[in-house]
Image: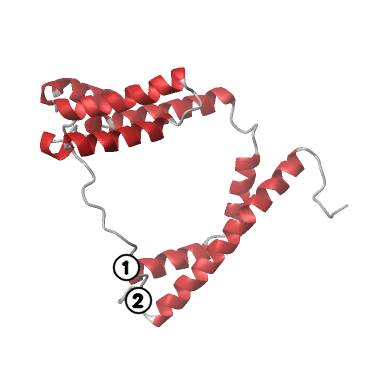
């Protein structure tokens, strides 16, 4: 099954026209395409959606994913009595450390310090015994690289071609963005008169 997915995605990638990639680069390079309030509103909405989806981890109980942020907050208020207090204390403490360091020591890496303090507290207080979810044991070393067994030679060739093309296109994108920005400013491309 994995081999078929790789072949399908490689063929799909080979079939996409170069025009779409190029036009996307110029879309990204066009800073006047969307107004600042639109970009700001979109970013704020994305932040609210992501924040609401993470509330279940802060309160320590499963909140059904609603179709909107308001439904998620409503489900949270209905199940607030199920809050796992140790999980809430750990999460709130981490947020307090990050916000406090951002306010009083803005040059310090607040998130990194919160993670290090969390690791230390987890070791000293044994969070798993308190019921706080932790990562658990991390296996040492890296897995050995291997080719999937159900991948045929033909599929390997197609997937290899798609990877080469993807790498080539990824290398060209910054160049296309620069060229698009230069055209916006009315400058000629370097080396061309």
**Which residue does the image show at 85% across and 54% down from the upper left?**
192
Residue at the outermost front position: 124
Nearest the viewer among 62 and 3 is: 62
**Count of numbered badges drawn on the protein:** 2
Residue 31, image x and y in percent? 64, 34
Label 2 or label 1, whichever comes before in sequence order = 1
Nearest the viewer among 178 and 138 is: 138
- Which residue position holds label 2? 151
Nearest the viewer among 12 and 51 is: 51
Residue 68 shows in this picture: no
Left or right: 170 with respect to 125?
right
**Which residue does the image show at 53% across and 60% down from the upper left?**
16
- Which residue position holds label 1? 2
Q: Quadrant of residue 75?
A: top left
Residue 74, image x and y in percent? 21, 22
Residue at the outermost top position: 104
């Amino acid at each position: 099954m994995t081999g078929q997915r790789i072949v399908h995605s490689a063929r799909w990638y080979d079939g996409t026209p170069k025009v779409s990639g190029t036009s996307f680069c110029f879309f990204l390079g066009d800073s006047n395409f969307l107004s600042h309030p639109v970009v700001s509103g979109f970013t704020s909405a994305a932040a609210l959606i992501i924040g609401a989806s993470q509330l279940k981890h802060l309160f320590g109980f499963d909140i059904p994913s609603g179709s909107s942020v308001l439904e998620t907050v409503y489900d949270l208020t209905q199940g607030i009595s199920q809050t796992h207090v140790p999980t809430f204390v750990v999460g709130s403490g981490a947020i307090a450390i990050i916000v406090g360091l951002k306010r009083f020591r803005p040059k310090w890496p607040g998130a990194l310090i919160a993670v290090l303090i969390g690791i230390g507290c987890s070791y000293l207080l044994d969070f798993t015994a308190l019921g706080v979810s932790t990562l658990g044991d991390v296996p040492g070393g890296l897995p050995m690289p291997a080719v999937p067994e159900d991948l045929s030679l033909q599929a390997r060739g197609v997937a290899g071609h798609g990877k080469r093309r993807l790498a080539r296109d990824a290398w060209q994108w910054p160049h296309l963005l620069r060229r698009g920005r230069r055209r916006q400013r009315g400058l000629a491309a370097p080396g061309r008169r």
